[in-house]
Amino acid sequence: MNKPTPGRPRPGASNVEGKVRLIGGRWRGTRLSVPDAPGLRPTSDRVRETLFNWLMPMLPGARVLDLFAGSGALGLEALSRGAASAVLVERDATLAAALRAVAARLPGGEAASVVQGDALSWLATQPEGAYDLAFVDPPFAAGMWEAVLPQVTTRLRPDGWLYVEAPHEAAFALPADWRLHREGRTREVRYALYRRTP
């Protein structure tokens, strides 16, 4: 979930607010509701298209973690494109309920597991190496990258992948065994895909 300054329009936003669509795979075209929550701005179609082109070779059968799920656009897009399972963690109860409703109406949506709770507290309960891919796109104003990234990297497999989205000015460091695979920029965000190198 992308969250820049509340009230700032989402780049590339259509005139119809409150919806985002899945752009590839078996659920292509499915519209997801985006409730009016402070700072909530799903990752843009263009960024998601680029990201999932990068991820295409590793997605089939992958176990995915969408840590700040928001609208669910990243986790559900991964499932739509062949991931085996996705855990979507969302602190806001209204957003979590909306995610459960979407998963319930999608054929095969039982592959999505929605957790309503605090991301850091929930991560502390997870075993090491449980996931192949994690999406980390926390609320921009909270500056959580330094707190979250050391925890989430241990929950990924030795050959795992990590996607991080942040404003340009955000500073964070990953453990030494992680390397930048690909990155891109929009007017407001830097998005980057990392891979662990044994």
Image (tube, helix red, strand yellow):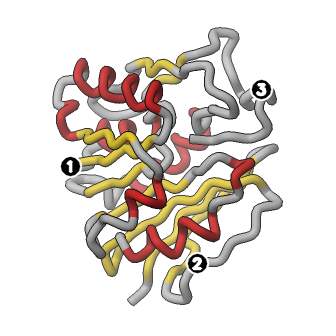
Q: Which mark is residue 139?
A: none
Residue 46 as seen in the image, left or right of residue 8 = left
Front-most of residues 91 and 47: 91
Which image quadrant: the N terminus?
top right
Label whose residue precedes the other's in the sequence (1 or 2): 1
Q: CA distance from mark 3 to mark 2?
A: 30 Å
Q: Which residue is mark 3?
A: 9
- In the displayed structure, 44 sits above or below 85; it is above
Would residue 46 appear left or right of 56 to someone viewing this image?
Answer: right
| Label 2 crowd bin: few (<14), some (14–19), many (20+), radius 10 Å | some
Disc 2 secondary structure class:
loop
Marking on residue 174: 2
Image quadrant containing the C terminus: bottom left
Secondary structure found at label 3: loop
In percent of width and height, residue 154 lies at 39, 76
Residue 3's spot in the image, x, y percent?
67, 40
Name which residue lies at 60% across and 61% down: 192
Secondary element at tag 1: loop
Residue that mark 1 sits on: 84
| Inter-mark Cα distance, 1 to 3 | 33 Å
Q: Position of residue 22 (x, y in %)?
A: 43, 28
Q: Give the class, few, some or many, for how many residues have Cα within 10 Å of label 3's Cα (few <14, many ≥20).
A: few
Q: Give the image location of residue 173, x and y in percent.
A: 65, 77
Q: Amino acid at mark 1?
A: Ala
Q: Residue at position x 69%, y 34% from top?
A: 39
Q: Is 84 left, or right, of 3 in this rendering?
A: left
Kind of residue sitting beneath label 3: Pro
Q: CA distance from mark 1 to mark 2?
A: 26 Å
Comes first in the chain, label 1 or label 3 = 3
Q: Is residue 129 above or below residue 113?
A: below
